[in-house]
Amino acid sequence: MLDGFVMALSGLTQGVRFVFTFQGLPNVVMLGVAAVLLYLAVKKGVEPLLLLPIGFGCLLVNIPLSDLMDEGGLLRFFYDIGISTEIFPLLIFVGIGAMTDFTPLLENPKILLFGAAGQFGIFMTLLLALALGFSQVEAVCIGIIGACDGPTAIYVTSQYAPHLLGAVSVAAYSYMSLVPIIQPPIMRALTTQKERLVRMPMSAASTVSPYTKLLFPIVVTAVTGLIAPKGLPLMGTIMLGNFMKESGVVQRLTGASENEIANIVTLFLGLAIGGTMEGHKFLRPETLAIFGLGFVAICVDTGAGVLLGKLMCFLSGGKINPLIGAAGISAYPMAARVAQVQGQLYDRRNYLLMHAMGANTGGQIGSVMAAAVMLSVLKGFGMA
């Protein structure tokens, strides 16, 4: 018994010595990062469903002598069964599809163009990442941050650049939570007072038939499979969730996808991502570059959407408010609410929400399609 106590004390002494040596400094820094993530989640309410388990996973993996990411460790187990196999992000996409209403997009299909413009930053950031020396697959993973679509970023990165998973995931969800802070200054800078005051009519009763809403996910899945088959798992799962919702015959499956399955998977996914944030692997110059490029991506995406909105405002004779163009990114439904709030700052009787929701759902499809196209191109050139 005494021998066991001595061994435990010796282990503790080694742990303390490890923390206060240069070798353990990266872990100390990451323990601080874990504390920041937990603070943001608990006190500030910043994406708590994911940042809290990510922060706690980061805490667990950076405790001295932790073996949770070693073979057989708890965090390694979550990583192997859910991220290495790509199952976790795909299951989350089923839940996202079950929660998404494509009616505003179907009522005004031209708004889908905002979803396309909202992906411009992805491709620009990809080129910047290549210029900075990242490989082709790494550049694709970094560019996806600009979509503000965490599951897509996780899916792509876990497949082709798992060593960047922690940095890309944290950057994607951090910027998604910062949409209400990042977007408004860009929206104001690129629009005039007259454009911001453009009123768009409130939607009346929906003119979209139930059959159209039921066929939409099937058609989108088929088209994606023909254009970019590499992205079929992404688009197929989100459209499966939406098809279940619109069918109305599997309420239990729809409810489970939205709630129980999504909640459990989010918990395990966050812990696994946090487990990739071990200090010696995470604290590298590439990490700072990824965060910087991610910021560029979301700014460019927002600007491209607003500029397209200005063009459509001009072509429509002043009937489209350019502010809804900022909702073309995939931060659903946060970006749509930002457009609504900004519109009402200048005219309290201006209701842009449903129009912005159409652009936002277009951005959801656009981000998945952008990832699908890039992955298919990489596969075609033998790089994926």
Image (tube, rainbow, N blue to C red):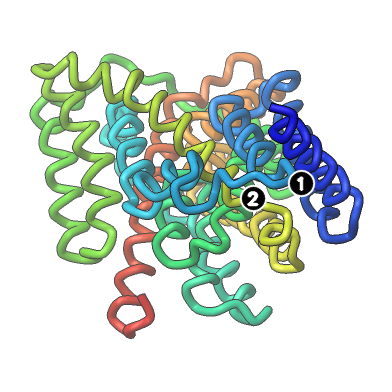
In percent of width and height, residue 342 lies at 66, 28
**Is disc 2 surrounded by few (<14), some (14 to 19) or many (20+) residues within 10 Å?**
many
**CB within 8 Å, label 2 to label 1:** yes
For the C terminus, which image quadrant?
bottom left
Q: Is residue 325 above or below residue 116?
A: above
Residue at (74, 65) in percent of width and height: 284
In the picture, the disc for residue 352 is: none
Q: Write down the quadrant of residue 7 in the picture.
A: top right
* Relative to 96, 289 lies left or right: right
**Is disc 1 surrounded by few (<14), some (14 to 19) or many (20+) residues within 10 Å?**
many
Residue at (90, 56) in percent of width and height: 21
Alpha-carbon span between mark 2 and mark 1: 8 Å
Residue at (44, 47) in percent of width and height: 72
In the picture, the disc for residue 277 is: 2
Viewer can see residue 309: no
Residue at (48, 37) in percent of width and height: 319
In percent of width and height, residue 277 lies at 64, 50
In percent of width and height, residue 331 lies at 51, 38
User: Which residue carries the number 1 mark?
Assistant: 30
Which amino acid type is shown beneath numbered disc 2?
Met
Q: Is residue 145 above or below residue 333?
A: below
- Residue placed most toward the observer, 201 or 115: 115
